[in-house]
Amino acid sequence: MIQAFISAIDRISLWLGRALAWLTLLMVLVMASVVVLRYGWGHGSVLLQDLVMYCYAAVFLLGAGYALRQDGHVRVDILYRRFTPNGQAWVNLCGTLLFLLPFCAFVVWSSWDYVALSWRIREVSPEPGGIPAVFLLKTAIPAMAIALALQGVAEALRAIQQLRQQPLPPNHPPHPQGEVL
């Protein structure tokens, strides 16, 4: 049951990471269009510039859980890589419980009113011709914390399994950096 839960969270993170990879391609194409329009035809587009910013924010914020799943986050690896698998599991478990999950809870708590107000007034871009949905952009803040917390729970459970010497879920390599989108 725990392995099924871990696998479900991993699948969500992997699906989100793959979707965001396509969003990155869209961001590059839109930015190239902005440059061609501006310097080729002398026409600027606030809407397209906003779209690039929205895509960037989505990739950066919503990709946090995927980065954790892929072990692509920043870690001071000087001591960690020398630890045994159980030592690494303790570091991962303590780091998740003491730092990651409280951080995620703080982000959701502190951004809730900010995002709710934006939704209440259906906040729009301050720029004429911009995307009329700033409230969607702001929603990415608590969404990032929720996605990151979910993946953090999966990583904590994975660490507990390691400490209990239970096998890791199927299709989970010991070093997830090897997985490719």
Image: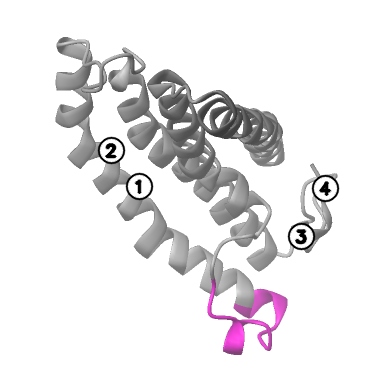
- Report how far apart the C-alphas of labels 4 and 2 lie in the structure: 30 Å
Side of 166 where 48 appears, left or right:
left
Residue 15 position within the rendered picture, expressed as x and y whole percent measured from the top left: 69, 30
> Dot 3 lies on which element?
helix
Residue at 60%, 51% in the rendered image: 67
Q: Does residue 82 belong to the magenta stretch?
A: yes
Q: Earlier in the sequence, mark 3 or mark 2?
A: 2
- Report how far apart the C-alphas of labels 1 and 2 lie in the structure: 6 Å
Residue at 31%, 29% in the rendered image: 138
Q: Quadrant of residue 108?
A: top left
Residue 25 position within the rendered picture, expressed as x and y whole percent measured from the top left: 69, 33
Label disc, if present, on residue 104 of the rendered structure: 1
**Residue type pointed to by label 1:** Cys
Side of 47 where 83 appears, left or right:
right
1 and 2 marks in contact (CB < 8 Å)? yes
In the image, the segment drawn in magenta is 75-87
Neighbour class for label 2 at 10 Å: few (<14), some, many (≥20)? some
Neighbour class for label 4 at 10 Å: few (<14), some, many (≥20)? few
- Report how far apart the C-alphas of labels 3 and 2 lie in the structure: 28 Å
Label disc, if present, on residue 108 of the rendered structure: 2
Front disc: 1 or 4:
4
The correct choice, above or below, for 42 with respect to 82 in the image is above
The residue singled out by tag 3 in the image is 177
Q: Nearer the viewer, residue 132 or 169?
A: 132
1 and 4 marks in contact (CB < 8 Å)? no
